Each structure stands twice: as structure tokens, then as C-alpha cells.
Image (cartoon, rainbow, N blue to C red):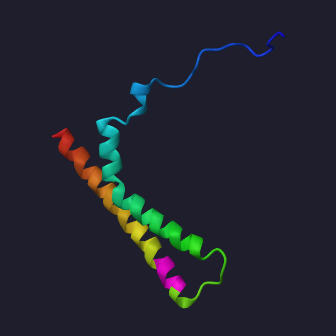
Amino acid sequence: MKLIVPVQDAVTALAADLEPTAAELDAIEHEAPLIAAELELLDVQIALLDRPASPLDERRLRRAANKVLAARAEVANRGASVREGDAA
């Protein structure tokens, strides 16, 4: 039997390249509050998929969305202050 698919080398990264770098871990830690707020918003949105929203549900959704906005602003402001400190 003759193979019609070309034989190629593997294109996946080596095992040593699979671990995140220290800079990537710092970036994840820096954005952790935003990630948590986005997960909370997603949980509320998922809960509202199969039922109509009650006034309490609407309040939960608004609060979660506001929390995401506040976390985004905090991450953006903290990132700007870090850049300013690096430049000095």
C-alpha cells in the first residue's frame, strides 16, 4: 500500500516550550481581577439563558457588568503606571 499523504515532521513545540514564561505569568496575575470579573459576568449570563430575567437577575447582570468595567479600568490604569515607572 502506498501512502498518498506526505510525511512531515511534527510541528508542535518541544516540551520545554510548553511552560509559560515568568513574564506571561506576571501578565496573567496582573489581569486576574479582570478575568474573575468576566467569569462572574459569564456565570450570570449563562444563568439567564433559559429563563426570563427577574428584577433581581437584572440587578445581578448590571452589577457584574459594572464590575467588569471597573476591573478593566483598574488593569488599564495599573498598566499605565507600570509603563511610566519603567521609563524613568
Residue sitting nearer the eye, 1 or 52: 1
Residue found at the very far front of the displayed protein? 1
Task: Give above or below for 72 relative to 64.
Answer: above
Question: Is 26 on the left or on the right of 8, as rendered?
Answer: left
> Which quadrant, please, contains the N terminus?
top right
Residue found 29% across the figure and 37% down from its top = 22
Q: Position of residue 52 (x, y in %)?
A: 65, 84
- The stretch drawn in magenta includes residue 18: no
* As drawn, 65 above or below 57: above
Identify which residue is drawn at 30% across, 38% down: 23
62 left or right of 4 in image: left
Please name whichever residue, 64 or 11, is drawn nearer the observer in this view of the structure.
11
On whether residue 60 falls in the magenta region, the answer is: yes
Residue that sits furthest to the right in the current view: 1
Report which quarter residue 77 is drawn in.
Answer: bottom left
| Apparent side of residue 12 relative to residue 18 in the rendered image (left or right) | right
Task: Determine which quarter of the picture holds residue 76.
Answer: bottom left
Q: Quadrant of residue 20?
A: top left
What residue appears at the point 40 percent right and 71 percent down from the top-left corner?
67
Q: Is residue 8 above or below residue 54?
A: above
Q: Residue furthest toward the bottom?
A: 55
- Magenta segment boundaries in residue numbering: 57-62
The one nearer the camera, 57 or 62, is: 57
Residue 31 is situated, as x and y percent measured from the top left of the image, at: 35, 54
Q: Main secondary structure of the magenta part?
A: helix
Question: Residue at left 49%, top 25%?
Answer: 13
Question: Where is residue 26 drawn, in percent x and y?
Answer: 29, 44
Name of the residue lying farthest toward the top: 2
